[in-house]
Amino acid sequence: MCRPGKPEGFHYLAHQTVDAENGIIVDVKATAGNVPDNIPYTEQIGRSIDTLEKMGIETQAVGADSAYDTALIHKELEEREVKVYMPKKETSDNSKTEFKREDFVYDSEKDEFTCPSSQTLTLKCLQRSESGVFREYRAQPKTCKNCPMKEKCLSPSQRSRKIQVNILQDIVSKHHKVDGSFEHTQALNQRQIWCEGTFSTQKSKHNLKQLFRRGLQAASDHCFLSACAVNLKRLLNFRMMKASC
C-alpha cells in the first residue's frame, strides 16, 4: 500500500457496506492494500442491494466518500434507480503543457474539438479505464508535427494532441446536482458516523488492526469475523432496548 497519509508496506484493506439505519454491516470484502477503493465497490454494492432485497428491504440511497466518485459506479446506481450522495472527486489537469483542456472548443454538431491553432481533433476510439469509458479525440500527427504552437501543446513523448471525454458524464453531473442539499449533507454525516465509526470500533475492540494469519483468504475470514462480532453486539443491544420498552 502506498497512499498519502497511510503507512507504506504490505497491507490488506477491508471494504464494508453499512446500513445507516441500524449500523449493521451488510457486506464486507477484503483486498490487497494496493487495490483502489472504487474497484470492488460496483460488485459489492450490487451484492448488498440484492441481499437486502431478498429480505424485503429496499435500498433507497447510498453515501460514499469522493474515492467512489467514478462514472462506472454512478452508472451502476443509476441503472438500479438508487440515489447517490458523495462528494465530487477533485480533478486537475496534470499535463505540463501550456495549452489545457479548456483551450479546446467542442462543436457538438460535428462532434469534434478545435485547438488554439484552429485544427480539428476528431473522434478516433473509445478507451476504458478504472474510472469509466471515454471518447478519445485526436489530431493528425502530421498536423501537430508542423504546427508552430506544438511546444505549447505537446509533451516530448506525444506525436499528436488527444482529449478524452467521459461518455457517462451526464449521469455523473445529474447525481452531483444534489451536492450541498440537506439530504446530501445528512447522508455524508451518516457515512461518517456509521462507516468511519464502525471501522474505529473494529480497530479498537474487534481485532481489525492486525491479522493473525497471512494470505488474502485469511484476511477475508478475519474481516468477516470482525464484522460479525460488531453485528452481533448491535443486534443484542437492539433486542435489549426493545425488551426494556
Image (spheres, rainbow, N blue to C red):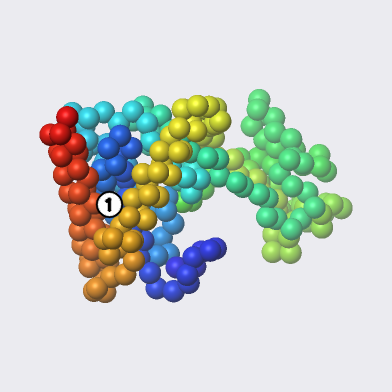
Q: Tell me where residue 55 appears, x and y as whole percent.
A: 16, 33
Q: Quadrant of residue 163?
A: top right
Give the vertical position of 160 relative to 191 (above or below): below
The secondary structure type at the circle numbered 1 is strand
Q: Tell me where residue 170 appears, x and y as whole percent.
A: 53, 30
Q: Quadrant of residue 88?
A: top right
Give the vertical position of 131 relative to 168 (above or below): below
Task: Give the residue at x 63% y 43%.
Answer: 137
The residue sitting at the front extreme is: 244
Neighbour class for label 1 at 10 Å: few (<14), some, many (≥20)?
Answer: many
Task: Give the residue at x 46% y 27%.
Answer: 183
Q: Amino acid at mark 1?
A: Val
Q: Tell me if I can see residue 197 in this picture.
A: yes
Which residue is identified by label 1? 28
The residue sitting at the left extreme is: 243
The residue sitting at the right extreme is: 148
Is the N terminus in the top left, top right, bottom left or bottom right quadrant? bottom left
